[in-house]
Amino acid sequence: MKKDAMSRRGFVTSLAALGMATVGLAGCAPKETSSPAADPALSSTGGSLPQKWDMEADVVILGGGGAGVAAACTAKEAGASVLVLEKANVIGGDTALSGQSMLGPWPEQQKAVAGIDDSIEEYIADMKNSYKWGAFAEQGREFPAEYPFTQLQCDLTPDMMEWTSDVIGVGWAPSGTADDPVTEGVLPQPTWDTKNCRTWMAMNPENSVMTAFGAACDSMGVDIRLRTEADRLIVDSGGRVVGVYAYDENDELIAVKAAKAVVVATGSFSGNRGMMERYLPITKGIQGGGCYGVTGDGMRMIRAIGGSLSEMDLGVHWYPFEAGTNSGQFSTTLILFGGSEGKVPGSQQPGIMLNYDGERFVSESNGYHLIGRATAQQPCQEAWYVFDSHPGVPDLILHAIPYNNRVVQADTVEELCTILRLPADTVKEQIAAYNASIEAGSDEAFGKLLDGCAPIDQGPFYALNIRPRPYATYGGVDTDLEARVLDAQGQVIPGLYAAGIVTGSYAAREGFYYNGGLAQALIFGRLAGKNAAADEAWEEAQPTGAESERQDVMTVVSCTDCHGDNRAPGEPNYHNF
């Protein structure tokens, strides 16, 4: 640790003692000292460089989630020295909490594994059908004539899949075979699938995404600094990003040099309540889902040096249901509305959603995002999922939420309403109307897919409290197709790349329905790492090196416990919490 480094609290206290307001930092002149804390304005205004660097590498990556580790391993393969700064005490980010599913075309493996003939062109043609459920359609915007980022992502999917499988060691397995039925809603969301094996899962804890990347980073010698929070980018007088100021695990300000480039992979802003309420008012009063560390850090750092952000108000993806566990850095979220193979098809759900007025308000087969968003607009921003005791129904739902205490059981509908404080007469009317639609075979009120569903008429009756959580924001940093960050005039900011959901969802930003963040994170993280490593260095780096006094890499082994596995109550989860 650098003895002359100044802590964040000490720096602000010193200014206060001198009668200086912290809002005036940009106008402070540099002090004659070697401490990087002496001139905090350099990162946003450009100018002279720190008199010394505390750490350095060819490529400095901010964030240790999927995009960050993909960039790190790719840059390391290319021969660059790499330093990853992760503010949490584990790597993983939202990738560790994801369903470990990669959506996209992999024609060669689709043919080899399941005998399915597919192509990138067919995949995109089907994906266009998702427009009607996406943010563009909701806002009345036309589907665009061009979608270069989505096209590039699909084009690069096979290479990413082969690299992560053969080099990194991710254990991808296809969903479905050629003989399995493919129906609307086979995924837990409105889908564009007409063919199987377009979703690849990595659910085995031994070779899941972050397990494999953690082992790869370790074997490649990627230097990962945990509990190290990037604060501001450092820009030289020519406008090139040359490093970053960060606070280390002891809250001391350090200067980190990036001889070639900085890659920003800090995630979305769903964990920043102020930004969420400013750009997405629908989320006001609702806790963000996903990784607690996604607070818009990278977006704000990039904006501070003139980088461009756009579509910040485009939207956010929703989980409809969250159950808390003692999982430390990570929120624990369950995707309920996804069905269960062999029991209830993914497009159908046996219960109905009721708000606090006792009324239905959404089609229960819409998929988790649309149900979550609709619930967020109800009184108290929550609702109740009501179902009965038809054979298999309680088992199907309660199995998905084994450690949740927000389930109510009652022998009659009236008793259930008394417990929930819902108007019993209204609830009984809603249930009667729904049961009539079951008998008629058509849900005229909301258009729910009813095939296989039964009336709600067998006690005991259950209600599950639904509290939605937003977790992936659609807007973010603007980049070109090489993952280089752009300024407000559309010009490349030298030495700066961005990848992952910090750039928002490319699919949503190009008119499609959000199709998950994992593929985008790995593909564009890999692209950013490759291009950053190929940049010409402004000055040779003397990397700290993984062999130095580094912090241990705490790898997230698996996050299946966060999605309702068979872990016994009280048993530590895979985060070791």
Image (tube, rainbow, N blue to C red):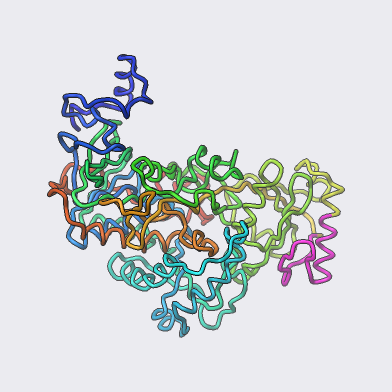
Q: Which residues are magenta?
A: 430-456
Residue 520 in view (yes/no): yes
- Residue 253 vs residue 144: left or right? left
Instruction: Say above or below: 9 vs 372.
Output: above
Q: Residue at x 35, y 53 (%)?
A: 486
- Residue 25 in the image: state x and y as whole percent: 32, 27
Quadrant where the C terminus lies?
top left
Hey, which residue is sitting farthest front in the picture? 489
Q: Residue at x 46, y 73 (%)?
A: 174
- Residue 301 vs residue 145: left or right? left
- Which image quarter: residue 219? bottom left
- Residue 137 in the image: state x and y as whole percent: 61, 61
* Residue nearer the viewer, 527 or 560: 527
Residue 574 in view (yes/no): no
Q: Is residue 440 magenta?
A: yes
Q: Residue at x 30, y 57 (%)?
A: 71
- Residue 431 in the image: state x and y as whole percent: 82, 57
- Residue 62 vs residue 392: left or right? left
